[in-house]
Image (cartoon, rainbow, N blue to C red):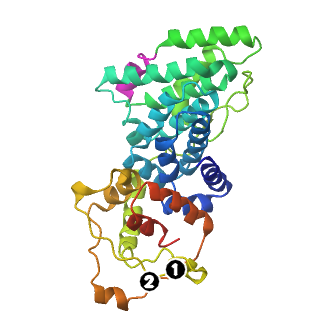
């Protein structure tokens, strides 16, 4: 799955139009699912790294992608991936950078840290520092990205922000700085620099892949972002789009463009509608996106007569989005895949 996540990241970072097209067809679910199923080995570390980069690029500047991440519990999945990959510096750096970027959104931030629950907040903040401490020796940008993640996660309302940031264990940060200075005396990674990141990263543009070189030389400084990221403004538009796709779900033939090649000798029989309690657990990511937005069950199955008379809607075959949704088949049932691809 690493090559597919890498392809999604490349396309999402190429143009805004490509990113929006991928987000609209539910591509955010692919790297989220990859984080869930990546094995605990070197190949899994590569998947986690590429998945994190893909999530960050899909979510950057896209309120719709942030909304999908909210509904899928994206911040929790990224955090779980970080705890599982603390021994891989490249994966830790990418996951920290993605966590810092997406948790600028309040809904995603509150999946991990809430001012009303300081003990849980301490657990999350310390886990981030432990992951950075275990892997930063090879790449000092890990410390910078950890400070950015701490900034975003503690960026609560003004009266709560100071209390949350007081929970950050500065001693752990100082220990990392001491080792960094011993290894790279000319490094720009200083105590003042870390405090600056904690204070300002939550309200800055975090599009850059790196802030520091592996040896600690500053590559990119923080820039004030144009507007605060948020998912709320996307809700109405996405809800209308997904509702419209639901109308085509049952009659859509996902194999139609491939049938001249002999793929799928006949139309698949309509799947029986499953009661909510019998739904497959794998549908939690993209299924949560669709059902959370629409707030109602899928349209009822068509009758046999209606199924024979209606022609499946035509669509333009686009291999990238189709490949993304083919992998997303591990996440959702075939009906939800059809919904995601129907209007590509």
333 up-or-down from 308: above or below: above
**Helix, strand or loop for disc 2:** loop
Does residue 179 appear anywhere in the picture? Answer: yes
Magenta span includes 220: no
Magenta span includes 162: yes
**Which residue is identified by label 2?**
312
Q: Position of residue 244 (x, y in %)?
A: 38, 73
**265, 88: nearer the viewer:** 265
Lateral position of residue 271 relative to residue 139, left or right: left
Badge 1 density bin: few <14, some 14–19, many ≥20, Cα 10 Å: some
Mark 1 in CB contact with mark 2 (< 8 angstroms) = yes
341 up-or-down from 316: above or below: above
Tell me which corner region of the image, top left, top right, bottom left or bottom right, holds residue 189: top right
**250, 231: nearer the viewer:** 250
**Of the numbered discs in the image, which one, if any, rests on residue 321?**
none
Q: Which residues are magenta?
A: 158-168
* Residue under the image location 48 percent in, 43 percent down: 37
Q: Position of residue 203 (x, y in %)?
A: 52, 35
Does residue 195 appear anywhere in the picture? Answer: no
Lateral position of residue 234 relative to residue 10, left or right: left
**Which residue is identified by label 1?**
256
**223, 328: nearer the viewer:** 328
**65, 330: nearer the viewer:** 330
Between tags 1 and 2, which lies in front?
1
Badge 2 density bin: few <14, some 14–19, many ≥20, Cα 10 Å: some
Q: Position of residue 24 (x, y in %)?
A: 49, 62
136 up-or-down from 68: above or below: above
* Residue under the image location 37 percent in, 62 percent down: 236
* Residue under the image location 41 percent in, 40 percent down: 108
**Helix, strand or loop for disc 1:** helix
In this view, the residue farthest toward the right is: 186
């Amino acid at each position: 799955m690493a090559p597919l996540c890498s392809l999604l990241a490349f396309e999402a970072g190429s143009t805004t139009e490509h990113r929006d097209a991928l987000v609209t067809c539910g591509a955010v679910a692919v790297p989220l699912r990859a984080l869930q199923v990546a094995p605990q080995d070197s190949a899994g570390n590569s998947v986690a790294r590429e998945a994190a980069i893909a999530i960050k690029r899909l979510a950057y500047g896209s309120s719709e992608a942030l909304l999908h991440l909210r509904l899928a519990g994206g911040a929790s999945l990224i955090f779980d991936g970080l705890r599982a990959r603390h021994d891989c510096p490249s994966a830790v750096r990418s996951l920290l950078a993605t966590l810092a970027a997406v948790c600028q959104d309040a809904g995603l931030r509150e999946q991990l840290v809430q001012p009303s629950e300081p003990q849980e907040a301490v657990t999350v903040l310390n886990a981030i520092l432990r992951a950075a401490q275990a892997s930063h020796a090879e790449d000092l940008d890990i410390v910078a990205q950890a400070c950015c993640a701490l900034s975003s996660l503690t960026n609560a309302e003004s009266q709560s922000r100071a209390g949350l940031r007081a929970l950050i264990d500065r001693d752990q940060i100082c220990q990392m700085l001491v080792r960094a200075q011993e290894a790279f005396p000319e490094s720009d990674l200083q105590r003042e620099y870390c405090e600056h990141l904690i204070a300002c990263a939550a309200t800055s543009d975090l599009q850059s892949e790196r802030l520091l070189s592996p040896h600690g030389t500053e590559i990119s400084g923080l820039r004030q972002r144009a507007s605060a990221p948020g998912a709320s403004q996307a809700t109405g538009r996405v809800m209308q789009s997904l509702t419209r796709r639901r109308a085509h779900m049952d009659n859509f033939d996902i194999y139609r463009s491939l049938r001249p090649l002999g793929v799928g000798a006949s139309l698949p029989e309509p799947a029986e509608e499953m009661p909510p309690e019998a739904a497959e657990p794998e549908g939690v990511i993209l299924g949560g996106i669709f059902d959370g937005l629409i707030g109602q069950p899928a349209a009822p199955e068509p009758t046999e007569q209606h199924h024979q008379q209606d022609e499946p809607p035509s669509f333009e075959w686009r291999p990238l989005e189709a490949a993304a949704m083919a992998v997303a088949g591990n996440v959702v049932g075939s009906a939800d895949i059809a919904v995601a691809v129907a209007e590509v």
